[in-house]
């Protein structure tokens, strides 16, 4: 599956605000929502639709309606910032949660929570997590989703690395990936450079 780098002007403007070290939590949240919306528009371009007729005040119009099951799965915590903007666009979607935490020393992600909808086999599953660093968290979550039967998955993130993208593509080649940026390197603590820092900490004011 190709990697889609979303270079829409609004996406890039929102990403700049997220990257800026002086952006406060309120602005950080607002721009996380702006960026998610632009990513979501790209990632949902291939959703199935069905034809319909709707009655306008002045007559009948042909229409296309979003068709088929959609499941949104944020990876806790940082992925939660992407849920509300996605639900605004896809109000009927079901939602699952996967809790993953990277070990501060090894950067290996381990799972601490999981609550997924039943019967995801026929659904379009949108896995959302703003940061794709080593790719370990995304691979862990995709393994889990495939394990419960998901067949059609897409990953939405804000900043990725080439290393993380290669790792995910190697394990899950059929997963479409949407990101606003591909940054060059990971530092010794496996943080993305230049990246935007610790997304969860900036979102929730923890550190
Ligand atoms: C961050 C981020 C991703 C993960 C990416 O989560 O939100 O889930 O790191 O890194 P990886 O690609 O190397 O796995 P973190 O574990 O810091 O948890 P948090 O969202 O609760 O802060
Ligand atoms: N998680 C983050 O929040 N930031 C990074 O740079 C890497 C992982």
Image (cartoon, helix red, strand yellow):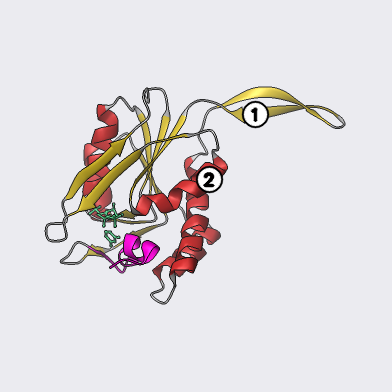
Q: Quadrant of ligand 2?
A: bottom left
Q: Determine if residue 166 is in view.
A: no
- Name the one closer to the observer, 122 or 178: 122
Q: Is mark 1 within 8 Å of ligand 1?
A: no
The residue wearing badge 2 is: 41
The residue wearing badge 1 is: 64
Quadrant of the snapshot with the C terminus = bottom left
The location of residue 155, given as percent across then percent down, is 37, 43
Q: Determine the secondary structure under disc 1.
A: strand
Where 119 sits versus 75, above or below? above
Q: Residue at x 40, y 69 (%)?
A: 19
The disc, 2 or 1, on the residue closer to the chain's N-terminal end is 2
Left or right: where 22 falls relative to 146: right
Q: What's the magenta region?
A: 191-207
* Magenta-colored stretch includes residue 77: no
Q: Residue at x 55, y 26 (%)?
A: 67
The location of residue 87, given as percent across then percent down, is 52, 42
């Amino acid at each position: 599956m190709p990697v889609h780098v979303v270079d829409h002007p609004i996406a890039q403007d929102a990403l700049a605000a997220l990257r800026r070290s002086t952006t406060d939590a309120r602005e950080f949240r607002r721009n996380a929502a702006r960026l998610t919306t632009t990513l979501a528009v790209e990632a949902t371009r291939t959703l199935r639709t069905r034809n319909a007729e709707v009655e306008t005040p002045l007559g009948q119009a042909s229409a296309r309606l979003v068709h088929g099951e959609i499941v949104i799965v944020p990876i806790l915590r940082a992925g939660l910032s992407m849920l509300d903007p996605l639900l605004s666009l896809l109000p009927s979607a079901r939602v699952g949660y996967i809790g993953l935490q990277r070990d501060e020393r090894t950067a290996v992600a381990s799972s601490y929570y999981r609550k997924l909808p039943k019967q995801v086999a026929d659904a379009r599953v949108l896995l959302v997590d703003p940061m794709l660093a080593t790719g370990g968290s995304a691979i862990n979550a995709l393994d889990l989703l495939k394990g419960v039967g998901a067949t059609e998955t897409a990953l939405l993130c804000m900043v990725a690395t080439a290393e993380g993208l290669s790792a995910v593509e190697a394990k899950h080649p059929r997963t479409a990936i949407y990101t606003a940026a591909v940054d060059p390197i990971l530092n010794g603590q496996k943080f993305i450079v230049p990246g935007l820092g610790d997304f969860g900490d900036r979102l929730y004011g923890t550190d």
